[in-house]
Amino acid sequence: MDQPAHAGAATAIGLVACGHRGSVVKLTEVKVSGWHQLCALDAIPRLGARVVKSAHGNIAVFRNAEDEVFALLDKCPHKGGPLSQGIVFGRKVACPLHGWNIRLDDGNAVAPDVGCARKFSVKVESGQVLLEI
């Protein structure tokens, strides 16, 4: 079922959802831990991100130009900026607040900056994005 939401909207993991522009895709599977089916890969734009709310905080799920997916805590290690609103390039995202580059594969800041955003396991199976919490 779809319902209105703003771009980059976050929704609770209790509802297990993947926010995307204009709507929220709600899923029926509800788990406390393990793999959660979020949305179709195509629901995440290339070079973009979607946000999932969880007990761990907002999680940004990214898709790069090669259709690789990555998941990081949606908080830059520098000043807490929303990484989901940053620019994705290659296997990195630039924080929208101060331009720090964060590697999507491990959450580490690119030198000379130092810090790390928490990484979550994510995969694509049969065109569906799955996140491990």
Image (cartoon, rainbow, N blue to C red):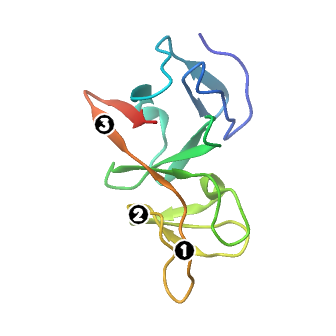
Judging from the image, what secondary structure is the residue with disc 3 in? strand
Q: Which mark is residue 20?
A: none
Q: Please state which of residues 122 and 86 is positioned toward the viewer in this rendering.
A: 122
N-terminal label among 1 and 2: 1
* CA gap, disc 1 and disc 2: 12 Å
* CA gap, disc 1 and disc 3: 24 Å
Judging from the image, what secondary structure is the residue with disc 2 in? loop
* Residue occupying image coordinates x 56% and y 81%: 114
Q: Is residue 94 above or below residue 26?
A: below
Q: Amino acid at mark 2?
A: Asp
Query: Would you name the residue on which mark 2 appears?
Result: 106
Residue 112 is situated, as x and y percent measured from the top left of the image, at: 53, 89
Q: Residues within 10 Å of mark 2 (few under 14, many from 20)?
A: some
Residue 97 is situated, as x and y percent measured from the top left of the image, at: 73, 69
Query: Would you name the residue on which mark 3 appears?
Result: 124
Q: Determine whether label 1 and label 2 are within 8 Å by CB.
A: no
Q: Residues within 10 Å of mark 1 (few under 14, many from 20)?
A: many
Residue 5 is situated, as x and y percent measured from the top left of the image, at: 73, 27
Residue 39 is situated, as x and y percent measured from the top left of the image, at: 45, 27
Residue 99 sits in quarter: bottom right
Q: Determine whether label 1 and label 3 are within 8 Å by CB.
A: no
Judging from the image, what secondary structure is the residue with disc 1 in? strand
Query: Would you name the residue on which mark 1 appears?
Result: 101
